[in-house]
């Protein structure tokens, strides 16, 4: 059940990809605004993950797990029934809030169930981890099936029966005793509002002008809100993110790598969907099927090979090398043409990019967590998940603005669309390359054996994990 929760939360970010063009037609999104269908979820999910973990600690993980599914079901109903763009965005944001409650509560419950035996916990973590790429793969395929043969609202309707069944089964989960403490609501509001305002400013900048008073004020407001978040964390007795966590070795460099990984990978996936449908003329099902080789390679490599490479070589070369391989795949994709083909222009480049992603993602997660003491392991996990989501949202906003300025907003003009998408792929390649080089230059030394992974597993005492 917990792996299914992880599967569904991740699927919620991928299932909408191939449905985007149909949603754009029906709901009236402009080409630049379409990204909000993705970013509304990611901002709410990433911005509230730390709060979700804290609530899981203070109110009980099973209770928050159930509450999260209730919120996710409500958001799915709103998103499926939406008749206007803004209602769709609201529904997606509500889904993100539900995901931010489900994910940390599921992890706490997982540790509670299996921490008595490190080997069993390792097996459970492997299954739980495999559910993430599996959810991404299923989302791409099911999004195509539902959109092609039913209609795009079905990419949200599917969550309703699964959510109801999960809620009915939550009584099978063990109760986790709540802990006493305070909730840093102001900190959660400040960081989420700051992220949302930053993304909004970048999205609107092509229309209002990058140097316009409105854009500058919005960006300054976002910076002020994020600065306020750090002031709050320093001043309150029980912050969402104690600033001392950043003294953990390699936490900063691993989070920087995850931020740039999200900023490169998610825009690639987003614009590749649009290129397949708006330039090559693929239908929703064909577009989903075209992305399956990439997602299957991701799932297979992450679950069968990455852990072995991590045990042998350590995280640093895999993160740096993976980001550089991702940059190579993105640079290859930047050569797409209006008269291109899937076999020549998409398949080989997307497989190279997927290989890079599968090399870097899990090692970056482990690098962020492996140096944390047991009482901060959950916090370190929550931070690295949050930075990946933040990078995804800001990267997609910035590259959408770039692509739109280079012609991606001219629907029907295939050369202009292709030029805009190519610009986005090129910029994403630069982001990934910078991430790879910075990782190789600044990330500290580490244990290049399975010892770090085993130590991290043995730290996972449920009484000390703060939720995620």
Image (spheres, grey):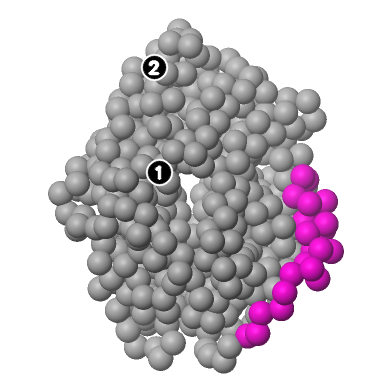
Residue where numbered disc 1 is placed: 308
Horizontal side of residue 409 vs 442, given as left or right: right
Could you tell me which residue is drawn at 54 percent across and 82 percent down? 463
Residue 372 position (above or below residue 1): below
**Magenta segment, prevailing SS (helix, strand or loop):** helix
- The residue segment tinted magenta is 157-178
* Residue at image coords 25%, 67%: 249
Q: Is residue 92 visible?
A: no
- Describe the element under mark 1 as helix, strand or loop: helix
Q: Please check the rendered image and state whether residue 169 is part of the magenta-colored stretch, yes or no.
A: yes
Place of residue 99 in the rendered image (x, y in percent of width and height, measured from the top left)? 61, 59
**Residue at image coords 81%, 71%:** 171
Q: Where, by quadrant of the figure, is residue 369 drawn?
A: bottom left
Q: Which residue is mark 2?
A: 336
Circle 2 sits in a helix, a strand or a loop, which is it?
loop
Label 1 – label 2 distance at C-alpha = 34 Å
Residue 48 in picture, x, y percent from top left: 52, 67
Instruction: Using the rendered view, name the quadrant where residue 219 is placed.
Output: bottom left
Q: Residue furthest left?
A: 441
């Amino acid at each position: 059940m917990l792996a299914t929760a992880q599967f569904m939360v991740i699927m919620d970010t991928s299932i909408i990809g191939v449905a985007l063009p149909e949603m754009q037609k029906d709901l009236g999104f402009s080409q630049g605004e379409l990204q909000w269908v993705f970013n509304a979820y990611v901002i709410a999910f990433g911005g509230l993950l730390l709060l979700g973990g804290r609530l899981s600690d203070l109110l009980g993980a099973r209770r928050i797990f159930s509450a999260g599914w209730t919120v996710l079901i409500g958001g799915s109903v709103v998103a499926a029934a939406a008749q206007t763009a803004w209602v769709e965005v609201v529904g997606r944001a509500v889904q993100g809030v539900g995901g931010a409650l489900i994910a940390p509560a599921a992890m706490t419950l997982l540790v509670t169930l299996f921490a008595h035996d490190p080997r069993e916990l390792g097996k459970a973590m492997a299954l739980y981890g495999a559910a993430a790429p599996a959810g991404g793969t299923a989302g791409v395929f099911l999004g195509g099936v539902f959109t092609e043969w039913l209609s795009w609202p079905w990419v949200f309707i599917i969550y309703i029966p699964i959510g109801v069944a999960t809620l009915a089964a939550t009584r099978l989960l063990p109760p986790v005793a709540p802990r006493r403490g305070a909730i840093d609501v102001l900190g959660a509001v400040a960081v989420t509002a700051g992220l949302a305002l930053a993304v909004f400013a970048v999205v609107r900048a092509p229309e209002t002008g990058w140097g316009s008073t409105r854009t500058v004020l919005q960006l300054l407001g976002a910076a002020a809100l994020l600065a306020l978040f750090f002031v709050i964390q320093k001043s309150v007795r029980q912050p969402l993110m104690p600033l001392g966590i950043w003294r953990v070795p390699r936490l900063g460099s691993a989070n920087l790598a995850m931020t740039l990984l999200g900023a490169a990978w998610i825009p690639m996936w987003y614009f590749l969907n649009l290129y397949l449908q708006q330039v090559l003329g693929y239908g929703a099902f064909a577009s989903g099927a075209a992305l399956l080789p990439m997602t299957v390679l991701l799932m297979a490599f992450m679950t069968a090979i990455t852990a072995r490479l991590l045990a042998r070589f350590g995280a640093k070369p895999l993160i740096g090398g993976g980001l550089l391989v991702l940059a190579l795949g993105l640079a290859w994709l930047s050569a797409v043409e209006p008269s291109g083909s899937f076999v020549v222009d998409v398949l080989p480049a997307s497989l190279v990019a997927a290989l890079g992603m599968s090399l870097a993602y899990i090692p970056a997660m482990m690098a962020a967590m492996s140096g944390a003491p047991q009482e901060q392991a959950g916090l370190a996990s929550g931070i690295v998940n949050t930075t990946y989501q933040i990078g995804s949202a800001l990267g997609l906003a910035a590259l959408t603005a770039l692509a739109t300025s280079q012609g991606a907003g001219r629907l029907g003009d295939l050369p202009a669309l292709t030029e805009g998408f190519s610009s986005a792929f090129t910029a994403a390649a630069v982001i990934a390359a910078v991430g790879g080089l910075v990782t190789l230059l600044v990330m500290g030394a580490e244990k290049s054996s399975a010892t770090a992974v085993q130590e991290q597993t043995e730290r996972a005492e449920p009484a000390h994990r703060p939720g995620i």
